[in-house]
Amino acid sequence: MENMNPESLLRKAQALGDDIKEMESIDVMGAYRQTQAKIKTNKRKSMYNQLMRYAAFLTIPLLLTSLFFGYLYFGGTDEEEQYAEVTAATGSVIRYELPDHSVVWLNAGSTLRYPTVFRNDNRNVELKGEAYFEVQADKERPFYVNTLNGLKVYVYGTKFNVAAYDDDSYIETVLEKGKVNVITPNQETIVLAPGEQLLYDKQSQKSKKNTVDVYGKVAWKDGKLIFRNASLEEIFKRLERHFNVDIQFDNKAGKEYKYRATFRNETLSQILDYLAKSATLKWKIQESEQQTDGTLSKTKIIVDLY
């Protein structure tokens, strides 16, 4: 440096000064922060990619589990049977169509319970009282009428009548057309042909098959009361349901009378007058009375046979 002339030293000094200025102009901390930010960003991307892989791994079984429980919840609800009930008030007769387009007539004081959608393998209904059925033919799905006492009637397509009132001592099945199978509570199966009646005695649990006048048994659905060789007890019981009254019968004479008659639009008084023509029979009406709950009692008819 001692041998350098002053101009050379000046130029080197200027070059050194420029280098120092350039180094001072570099933002060391900013560069450090940028480097750290890039490292963090790369870490985030790596962690995000890992989490997404884990999420995908967990989501698939979770989705399958959700679908499974969803199927159990919603699919199971679809499988549950929903039931409906239809009732004919005392003193009335109603006609009703079932989901399979079978038609049923319910007699006074009767109730039919049935599923809103029949199953694929059968058609089950429950009967309290009396009903006449016109069942749509379906060989793949038998039609069952179940009574409270355990007696069942099953068919594939036919016309028949079942009377199963709680206060009757028997259950009656009458076949008009086709074929019916009656299963008694003790699992005895009895086949009926058209024109036949099966009487099942609730007390003795015995069955009896008869040939009957079918229309006389089913004419109630057309608003008619037909009696064939009927006792006064049988007639009064049917009149009670038909006219929604209580009939108190006292057979003082102890005599037995049988009647053959058809009533269409006659009043109760007219029918009782007709019965009194062939027997020493007197009757009177006891009007309805208001009960403690505010409702009216049924009209009572007192009938005495001398």
Image: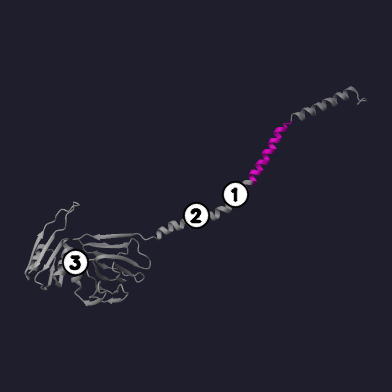
Question: What span is in magenta?
Answer: 26-46
Tell me the CA gap for discs 3 and 1: 75 Å
45 within the magenta span: yes
Report the amino acid beneath label 2.
Ser
**x, y (%) of residue 161?**
24, 69
In screen coordinates, is 23 left or right of 51? right
Q: Quadrant of residue 193?
A: bottom left
Which of the two discs, 2 and 1, labels the residue nearer the N terminus? 1
Splitting the image into 4 quarters, where does residue 33 fall?
top right
Label 2 and label 1: CA atoms lie apart by 20 Å
Q: Count up the numbered dots.
A: 3
Which of the numbered marks, if any, corresponds to residue 66?
Answer: 2
Image mark for residue 220: 3
The residue sitting at 9% across, 66% down in the picture is 304
The amino acid type, in three-letter code, at marker 1 is Met
Q: Residue at x 89, y 22 (%)?
A: 6
Q: Position of residue 171 (x, y in %)?
A: 24, 70
Residue at image location 11% in from the left, 67% down from the top = 250
Q: Which badge, 3 or 1, comes first in the chain's sequence?
A: 1
- Crowding at dot 1, Cα within 10 Å, few <14 / some 14-19 / many 20+, comes out as few
Magenta segment's dominant SS is helix
| Pointer 1 residue | 52
Disc 2 secondary structure class: helix
